[in-house]
Image (cartoon, grey):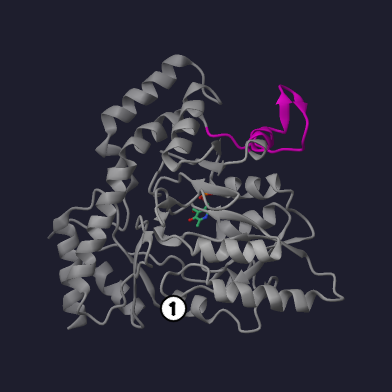
Amino acid sequence: MTPPIPQSSPGAGYLACKDEIDAAIAEVLSSGWFILGKQTAAFEKEFAQFLGAGHSVGVGNGTDALELALRACDIGPGDAVLTVSHTAVATAAAIELAGATPVWVDIDPETFTMAPERLRETISEYEEAAVGKNLPLLKAILPVHLYGHPADMPAILEIARLHGLRVIEDCAQAHGATLNGKPVGTWGELAAFSFYPTKNLGALGDGGAVVTNDPALAEKLRLLREYGWQERYVSRLPGMNTRLDEMQSAVLRVKLRHLAADNARRRDIARQYDEALAATPLRLPRISSQAESVYHQYVIRTERRDELKAQLQAAGVGTLIHYPVPIHQQPAYAGRCYQSLHGLPHTEQAAREILSLPMYPQLTNESVNQVCDLLLRWCN
Ligand SMILES: Cc1ncc(COP(=O)(O)O)c(C=O)c1O
């Protein structure tokens, strides 16, 4: 009996650099300083450098990073934000936490990211529907680089420019992904990252960051993350409390040094899946030209998804569905937010067919082969 293969393994990520992490944590413990100190300042600088961005502001998690990015743009009640329904619910939750309303845009079925054509169509339909009505005003576009694959940023930025909309990127699943050689997180005005343990850059708890090239926005974010304090105990803005702590920052500094190699290993695993499964009827991930994915997930498609998932589970192989119910169909959101008259057919079809195979840097070639053998047998 071979040991089970999990879909992801943050524990293996820790063990891979345990000595370095343990030493970094010991340093924080002996410093006696746990919130907003040297480690967070150093991580913010190193993460901004890694991306080639001007500033990075550490916060409590990725959802807060999105909310804070929206708030920094003064987006709130009475405003609408164009985003996708095929994403983690956090994307929509953050828009509503800021007080704004999501407007759904369908995805490109090949890349699972916001389809520029559908974005254009949704904006013009929404603007027409808003005439004479009290609908929230479109203020921003929030594309998600889902599964580590960059959204079509040049097209999205052009549409944003034409309509005077701001662009905030959801980079929670795409640390290090690039488009035309330019990292995601440096295309929009602001970008939000999550350091949830399973992410490509994962902490040993919650963490997040907002990235921007604009020094004034960076300054505003620093205020907003800590009660709006300009100086201690005096709030200049109504802010929140969402800080990346010293312990997680120290861990992330270690993990950041391994990120490029970890992403390369994910691409290597993806290549092995691609080659082994090429001749099967399974639909494999497609990477658009000029894009470099960091394969946060390796997502295949089949109409017999549930059957395949059960079969793999029975053989000890963990898989997940990211995500089984599109946000616009979840009880908390159903019927509340605007969507195109054409509906969201690609979003809904993806939710029925997708399956995320095991994917994490410490996954061995032997385990990848085992998963591929099971898939090949299932297909024949
Ligand atoms: C696409 C996306 N956006 C936002 C988030 C929110 O991040 P967090 O879980 O750190 O709040 C996540 C992570 O779950 C995510 O996958």
Q: At which x and y percent is residue 314?
A: 24, 69
Picture layout, residue 233 above or below residue 61: above
The type of residue carrying mark 1 is: Arg
> Looking at the rendering, which quadrant does residue 333 occupy?
bottom right
The part of the chain drawn in magenta is 218-244
Front residue (pair 305, 209): 209
Give the residue furthest to the right. 132
Q: Identify the element where label 1 is drawn.
A: helix
- On the rendered structure, is 214 left or right of 206? right
> Looking at the rendering, which quadrant does residue 322 occupy?
bottom left
Q: Is mark 1 within 8 Å of ligand 1?
A: no
- On the rendered structure, is 66 left or right of 287? right
Q: At 63% from the left edge and 61% from the top edge, which residue is drawn?
A: 141
Q: At 72% from the left edge and 38% from the top edge, which residue is drawn?
A: 239
Front residue (pair 264, 255): 264
Query: Is residue 82 something that shows in the picture?
Result: no
Q: At 80% from the left edge and 74% from the top edge, which residue is drawn?
A: 130
> Looking at the rendering, which quadrant does residue 156 occupy?
bottom right
